[in-house]
């Protein structure tokens, strides 16, 4: 049994050690604070180019569009120059009353309901095939699937416009029997162009997620007697669900910004009007010119896209997890 004097000396030694450790930690924290303060200039210097470009190419245009949406053009008489004045919510009232705007959004949502499952389903199938040990020549097929995405959207739309035209199509019999550019089918022709263009890049996102899965999980599934199809359904697809959700959200945003494909096909199809897609309506309104109403259309479209993407993300995440 230790004596009281020994115990008190031991306690004092522990107290001194604790105080020394606390002083050392405090000194190290002070050093870290000094280092952080010393490198603030370098941090700002590295971030400055991005912040300047981000503000110049994103924040300033968005802010200017919001400002323009609250203005209106006023003429005192027929011969006086137009002046811009604060119009309050007048432009937004016109947006909410515009049937063409809401019809264009419904048209895009109708396309998304059919085109997105087909495109993402094909992308998932191709990614699973490339990740399968049975398939040979993976490098060639990976490049072949991605090549359409490297073609600019306008060029792809022009190329498919020639394919759809009966007098120019390499498959004239099919083009004559099916009116790909008619008012009832041109929406699905645009969906075909989008599927051809963007399936490859979505496939690469899913394939990258598949390559990040530890091989030990496949070995454990094989020991349990699972085949390649069972492994794909029960192991691979659940583990790459975040990548699937990301491609879904990106697809929704991209479809709401649809512009190039219908704009090109408008020159060869009477089924595509100047208000076919929301962005086409914004473009046509700005050419009137009515920049204030076009800005209001853009702001409402951006808010609708954000709300739709966020809502879609929450619904999918709730069902997936």
Image: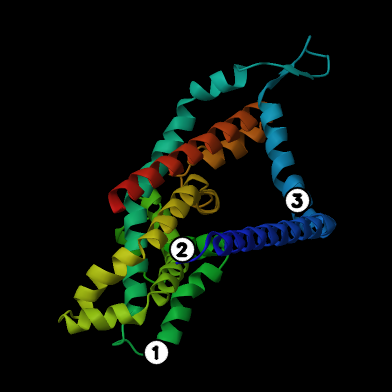
Secondary structure category for the residue under label 2: helix
Q: Nearer the viewer, residue 15 or 26?
A: 15
Image location of residue 188, percent across then percent down: 36, 52
Label 3 to label 2, Cα distance in Å? Answer: 30 Å
Is disc 3 in contact with disc 1, using a CB cutoff of under 8 Å?
A: no
Q: Which residue is mark 1?
A: 137
Q: Quadrant of residue 194?
A: bottom left
Nearest-to-viewer mark from 3 and 1: 3
- Reading the image, the residue beneath label 3 is 51
Local SS, label 1: loop
Residue 273 lies, in percent from the top left, at 49, 40
| Residue 278 point in image, percent of width and height | 51, 39
Left or right of 137 on screen, residue 159: right
Question: As rendered, which of 14 and 122 lies closer to the eye?
Answer: 14
Neighbor class of circle 3 (other Cα within 10 Å; few <14, some 14-19, many 20+) is few
SS at badge 3 = helix
């Amino acid at each position: 049994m230790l004596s009281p004097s020994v115990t008190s000396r031991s306690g004092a030694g522990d107290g001194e050690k604790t105080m020394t450790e606390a002083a050392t930690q405090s000194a190290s924290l002070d050093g870290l604070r000094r280092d952080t303060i010393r490198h603030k200039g370098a941090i700002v210097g590295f971030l400055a180019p991005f912040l300047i470009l981000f503000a110049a190419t994103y924040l300033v245009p968005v802010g200017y569009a919001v400002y323009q949406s609250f203005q209106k053009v006023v003429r005192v008489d027929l011969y006086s120059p137009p002046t811009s004045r604060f119009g309050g919510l007048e432009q937004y009232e016109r947006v909410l009353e515009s049937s063409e705007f809401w019809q264009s959004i419904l048209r895009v949502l109708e396309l998304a309901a059919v085109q997105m499952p087909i495109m993402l389903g094909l992308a998932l199938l191709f990614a699973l095939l490339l990740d399968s040990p049975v398939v040979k020549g993976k490098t060639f097929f990976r490049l072949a699937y991605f090549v359409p995405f490297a073609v600019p959207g306008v060029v792809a739309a022009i190329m498919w416009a020639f394919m759809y035209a009966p007098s120019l199509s390499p498959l004239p019999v099919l083009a004559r029997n099916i009116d790909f550019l008619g008012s009832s089918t041109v929406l699905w022709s645009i969906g075909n162009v989008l599927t051809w263009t963007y399936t490859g890049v979505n496939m690469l996102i899913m394939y990258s997620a598949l390559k990040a899965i530890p091989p030990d999980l496949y070995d454990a599934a094989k020991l349990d007697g699972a085949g390649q199809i069972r492994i794909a359904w029960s192991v691979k697809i659940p583990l790459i669900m975040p990548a699937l959700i990301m491609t879904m959200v990106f697809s929704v945003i991209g479809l709401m910004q649809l512009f190039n494909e219908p704009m090109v096909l408008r020159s060869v199809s009477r089924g595509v009007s100047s208000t076919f897609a929301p962005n086409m309506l914004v473009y046509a309104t700005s050419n009137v010119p009515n920049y204030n109403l076009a800005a209001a259309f853009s702001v409402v479209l951006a808010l609708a896209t954000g709300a739709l993407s966020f809502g879609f993300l929450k619904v999918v995440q709730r069902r997936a997890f």
